[in-house]
Image: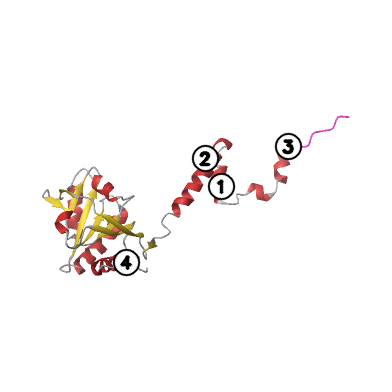
Amino acid sequence: MARSRPHRAGARTLEPLTRALPRSPHQILCASFGPRYRGRVRTLLAIAVSLSLVGCSSASGANGGLVRVEDRPLPALEGKGLGGAPLSAAAFRGEVLVVSVWATWCLDCERDQPGFVRVAGRYAGRGVAFLGVNPEETSTAQPLAWVRRYDVPYPSIEDPSGRFAASLGYTGLPATYVVDRTGTIRYSIIGSTTSEATLSSLIDRTLSGDASGTPSP
C-alpha cells in the first residue's frame, strides 16, 4: 500500500520560533530584499555605521547639533542682502562673526531663530556680528516676512543657487559658523542650535582667542 505524504501545509508550524521572528534590525532590513540585493544592503549598512563614527571627535551641544572645531578661512560671501543692498562678510572683518545658514522651509531653523535673536542682542556692541545666508529660495518675499516676524536684527545674504552655503561646506540646515576676527572659521554647528548656552560659549571662546576645544554641553 502506498504511503501517504505528510501534510506540507503544517510543516512550517514546526520551524523554530527564532526563524519566524526577526532577531535584529539588520535581519529585518535584509529580509525585505531578495538574495540578489542582500550583499548590497550589508555594504550600505557598513557605510552608514562608518559615517556615524566620522564625527567622534566632535561634541554634541546640549539639545543641539554637532559642534566641530575648525581652522579654515571663511569663503567669500558677497552678494545682495534680502533688501537688495550689497552685502559682504568682509565688512565684518575685525569682529567675531556668527554666520547662520537658514531657510524658511527649515523647521529646525524656525525653532532656532528666537534663540539666535536673543544671543545676537546679548552680544550687541561687544565686537560680535551676525550674518545670515539664505539658500535655495527663489523669492525674497517669504524670507523678508520671516525677518519681520522674528524681528531679526542682523542682515542675510540672498543665496538662491546655494553656492554660498555650499562654499561653507554645509551638509544640511541649519548650519552655524563662528568666525574669528581674522576671518578664520573656528567652530561649526551642524544641525539645530537650540542651546543658547552652547552658542554663547563658542562665541566667548572665539572672543578670548581660545579655540582649542569644544565646550562642555
* Position above or below: 156 against 121: above
The answer to whether the residues at label 1 and label 4 have Cβ atoms under 8 Å apart is no
* Position above or below: 104 against 196: above
Q: CA distance from mark 2 to mark 1?
A: 15 Å
Look at the numbered disc 4 and give the secondary structure of its residue: helix
What's the colour scheme? secondary structure
Identity, as a three-letter code, of the amino acid under mark 2: Arg
Would residue 115 be visible to someone looking at this image?
Answer: yes
| Nearer mark to the viewer, of 3 and 2 | 2
The residue that disc 2 covers is: 40
Q: Find residue 132 and report its horizontal and vertical position in percent.
A: 21, 55
Magenta run includes residue 3: yes
Upstream in the sequence, badge 2 or badge 1? 1
Q: What range is drawn magenta here?
A: 1-8
The residue that disc 3 covers is: 8
Upstream in the sequence, badge 4 or badge 3? 3
Q: CA distance from mark 4 to mark 3?
A: 64 Å
The residue that disc 4 covers is: 198
Identity, as a three-letter code, of the amino acid under mark 3: Arg
The numbered mark at residue 106 is none
The quarter of the picture where residue 14 lies is: top right
Q: CA distance from mark 1 to mark 3?
A: 26 Å
The quarter of the picture where residue 3 lies is: top right
The answer to whether the residues at label 1 and label 3 have Cβ atoms under 8 Å apart is no
Q: Nearer the viewer, residue 3 or 74?
A: 74
Packing grade of label 2 (10 A; few <14, some 14-19, many >=20) is few
